[in-house]
Every structure is written in C-alpha cells, then in structure tokens.
Amino acid sequence: MTAAQPDTGTGTGPTVLRILLGRRLRELREAKGITREAAGYEIRSSDSKISRMELGRVGFKERDVADLLTLYGVSDEQERRTLLDLARQANSPGWWHRFGDVSPTWLQAFLGLEPAASLIRTYEVQFVPGLLQTADYARAVTLLGHERLTPDQVEKRVALRMERQQLLTRENPPQLWAVLDEAVLRRPIGGWAVMRGQIAALMEATKLPNVTIQVLPFAAGGHSAAGGAFTLLRFPEDDLPDIVYAEQLTSAIYLEKRDDADAYAEALERLSVEAEPPSRTPEILDRVLHEIDSA
C-alpha cells in the first residue's frame, strides 16, 4: 500500500483514505488472530471503536494507529511511516466540510466517495441526477423538501451541488452513466422554464466524452429497478468494493457487500438494455424541448 495524496476536491479524499486504512488495519489484525476486543484494549477503547475504525467511519489518532501497528507486529519502518502518513491525510477535512451546516451527515460520506470513483452509474426515477442539474433546477429540488430553509441556506445547498459537478470536467474525470426514467423529463420541477433550461443542459452533457445518458421510456413498462433511484460507485483501488448509495426521506443506505452490489449492477445492466440507446438521447431530449415550446 502506498500513501495517497490529500484531498483537493478532485480525487481521493479523506473518506476513501479512512476506508483504505481501516481495511489494512483489519487485514493486519486478522492475520495475527487478534480479536477486536484485544485491539480495543490496546488503544484504551472498545471493540466497537475498532469496528468503526476498520470500516473507515471515524477519524484516526496517530497514537492509536501506531499502537495497533505495534500490536499487529508491523516493525518495518517504511510500512509504519506509510500507514501513519495515511492516518494524517485521512484526518484532513474534505472540501464539502464547509457546507456541513446545510448538508446532512448521511450525505457527507457520499460526498467523500463520489470524487474518488472511476465509474458512477445511476438510475433516477424522479429527478435529474445531481451531477447534471442546473442551478435553477437544483434550487427548485431543494425547495421541494426544505421549505423552512432561509434563502442563504438554499443558495448554499445549490452551491454545494454545483461544486460537486466540477468532477465531470476535471482532469481524468470519472465515467458517468445515467439512466433516466422518462418521468424525469416530463415532470416540470420548478416550472417549464426551469425544465427547458435543464433539458438543454442535458443535451450539452451528452457531448461530454465521459457522460452517457439513456432514457427509459414509459413504453418499457415494469423493470428491474422498480424499488427506486440508486447510484453505484466503482473505484480504481483494488481494496475498495463497489458501493451502492440510495437516499431515503431522512437518511441514506450504503451497501458494499459483494452480493448486494452485484444485484444492483445486474439491475443497471438490464435497465441499460431496456432503455433507449445513448445514441437516441439527443433526439429524445430535442423532442421534449419542442413539446415544451409548443405547450
């Protein structure tokens, strides 16, 4: 394992670093046959703290990592230095932390994982994916469920979404593959003027070499993703599994077990077959624009 660079908002950030370090610590512990309870005792804590560390869900104290490395028999100075450097980098705040007052805690893990993905596959049934939303559309979506937000809070949420989108045009961007239910294009979020601008933006997005958009027409009937919208993240690091993210009304779920991720990946494959091919997307969007203009 080599030390990664601190987060710049455009690559591997602290969330991913914590996961990678946690996995390595778990591997070292299991290789020595040491229980979580014994490891927790070594750092003056509990087995639940070790579990959270190994899952990458908490920050790392360098002293704790150093003590665990000693317990696990890691004496090679280069490996110790690499892992301790990783612990320091994993504790640096991500770019999204300055939006912490307007973003729920369950979203922040996703904001840390998304920039590190090499492939982002998403299915949306109601809204345009956040990475493809215009500011006006994002503002309208925000107001749908957060009527009590102040105007400043609304604008800060919009700014957060716009900053997320920078990853699509950065150097070495991820591949984004989005399947949109036809209802996404037919539902006038924010009114038809906002929707017209949003669909025009989708047409521009189809020109990006790293963006693929498909439309699942009403005529397709029932389909394999009837449960709702979700996103699958795939990472270039071999140590990181695919992660499925699905938002709920007041929380989100993260799935990383191989069987779960494979099931969602298979659903996406079926959706991509049932949807119109990407080559037809500009034509479909153009037709919807003409329908809006003639309404």
Image: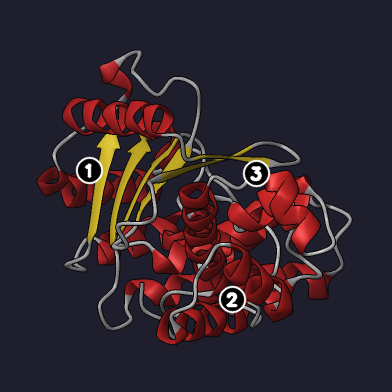
Quick check: marks 3 and 2 in contact, CB under 8 Å? no
Quick check: marks 1 and 3 in contact, CB under 8 Å? no
The residue under label 1 is 284
Asked which colour scheme the image uses, the reply is secondary structure
Q: Which amino acid does label 1 sit on?
A: Ile
Image quadrant where one finds the N terminus: bottom left
Q: Please state which of residues 283 and 43 is positioned toward the viewer in this rendering.
A: 43
The residue under label 2 is 90
The residue under label 3 is 35
Give the x, y percent position of residue 110.
56, 57
Quick check: marks 2 and 1 in contact, CB under 8 Å? no
Give the x, y percent position of residue 157.
69, 68
Mark 2 element type: helix
For marks 2 and 1, the one nearer the N-term is 2
Mark 1 element type: helix
Q: Residue at x 34, y 19 (%)?
A: 224
Q: Which residue is drawn at 60% across and 48% down?
A: 34
Left or right position of 64 against 178 = right
Q: Which amino acid does label 3 sit on?
A: Thr
For marks 1 and 3, the one nearer the N-term is 3
Nearer to us of marks 2 and 1 is 2
For marks 3 and 2, the one nearer the N-term is 3
Q: What residue type is labelled 2?
A: Ala
What is the spatial separation of the Cα atoms under label 2 and label 1, in whole angstroms? 44 Å
Give the x, y percent position of residue 105.
74, 57
What is the spatial separation of the Cα atoms under label 1 and label 3, in whole angstroms? 57 Å
